[in-house]
């Protein structure tokens, strides 16, 4: 992605965070993008290769209902549906959800606008496979305890939670995105 576009995302995030609004920048960024994916730093328009690797290696262990948290533009949710999961996907950004629906008009996936931190109660213990990729780590750290509690609450007894995050060594810079 062009550095100029990354700068736009960073500025929008910083404006909201400095105003004490932890979550509003996502919708603002998606609106600003106007369905131009290069503006969204994480919008690769393809499935996460780590998810693909994990699913290929654990093919016979997972099935049933799946949930993708902070689904962005829907590629991972579509992959789970393609592999036979009854998949639900949600994101806090209405624009991201509308964009996903437009990208995949024939999809079986219900794309839902929801905040992880006030998610529908009937999702508790409902999903055999829950995918969280890169959302937790873009939230301010004071939200992590509640976010983790919610994320794990969606997993059915015996189900699997797959968390994909970018890592860095302690001596590496934190990077410019939140
Ligand atoms: C870094 S992006 C990752 C998107 C996608 N999971 C991926 O791997 O490409 C984080 C996503 O989580 C969404 N998000 C952020 N906070 C959220 C919340 N509290 N509830 C639901 N979605 C949230 C954002 O709108 C954004 O689409």
Image: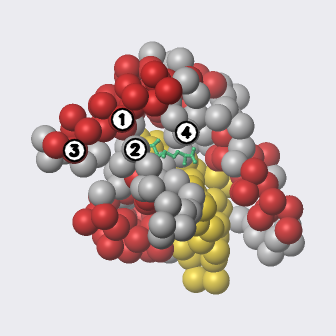
Closer to us: 121 or 118 = 118
Coordinates of residue 102 in the picture (x, y in percent): 58, 22
Observer-side mark, 1 or 4, equals 1
Q: Is residue 65 above or below residue 27?
A: below
Question: Going from the N terminus, do you reach mark 2 or mark 4 first?
Answer: 4
Closer to us: 166 or 153 = 166
Question: Going from the N terminus, do you reach mark 3 or mark 4 first?
Answer: 3
* Residue at mark 2: C-beta within 8 A of ligand 1: no
User: In the image, what residue occupies the spot 36% across and 35% down?
Assistant: 10
User: In the image, what residue occupies the spot 24% across and 48% down?
Assistant: 22
Q: Which residue is mark 4?
A: 42
Observer-side mark, 2 or 4, equals 2
**Residue reaching furthest to the front:** 171
* Residue at mark 1: C-beta within 8 A of ligand 1: no
* Residue at mark 4: C-beta within 8 A of ligand 1: yes
Closer to us: 151 or 168 = 168
Q: Which residue is mark 1?
A: 10
Observer-side mark, 1 or 2, equals 2
Q: Secondary structure at mark 3?
A: helix
Closer to us: 154 or 171 = 171
Contact between labelled residues 4 and 3, with CB atoms less than 8 Å apart:
no
Observer-side mark, 3 or 1, equals 1
Q: Secondary structure at mark 2?
A: loop
Label 2 to label 4: alpha-carbon separation:
14 Å
**Quarter that holds the N terminus:** top right
Q: Say the numbered circle drawn on residue 17.
A: 3
* Residue at mark 3: C-beta within 8 A of ligand 1: no
Label 3 to label 1: alpha-carbon separation:
10 Å
Q: Which residue is mark 2?
A: 176
Contact between labelled residues 2 and 1, with CB atoms less than 8 Å apart:
yes
């Amino acid at each position: 992605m062009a550095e100029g576009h990354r700068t736009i995302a960073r500025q929008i995030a910083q404006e909201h965070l400095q105003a004490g609004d932890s979550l509003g920048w996502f919708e603002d960024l998606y609106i600003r993008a106007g369905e131009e994916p290069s503006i969204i730093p994480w919008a690769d328009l393809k499935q996460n290769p780590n998810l693909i690797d994990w699913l290929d290696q654990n093919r016979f262990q997972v099935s049933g209902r799946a949930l993708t948290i902070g689904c962005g533009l829907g590629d991972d949710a579509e992959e789970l549906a393609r592999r036979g999961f009854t998949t639900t996907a949600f994101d806090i950004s209405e624009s991201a959800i509308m964009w996903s629906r437009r990208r995949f008009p024939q999809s079986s996936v219900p794309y839902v606008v929801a905040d992880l931190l006030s998610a529908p109660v009937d999702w508790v213990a409902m999903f055999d496979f829950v995918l969280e990729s890169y959302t937790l780590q873009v939230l301010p750290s004071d939200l992590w305890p509640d976010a983790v509690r919610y994320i794990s609450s969606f997993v059915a007894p015996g189900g699997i939670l797959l968390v994909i995050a970018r890592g860095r060594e302690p001596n590496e810079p934190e990077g410019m995105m939140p």
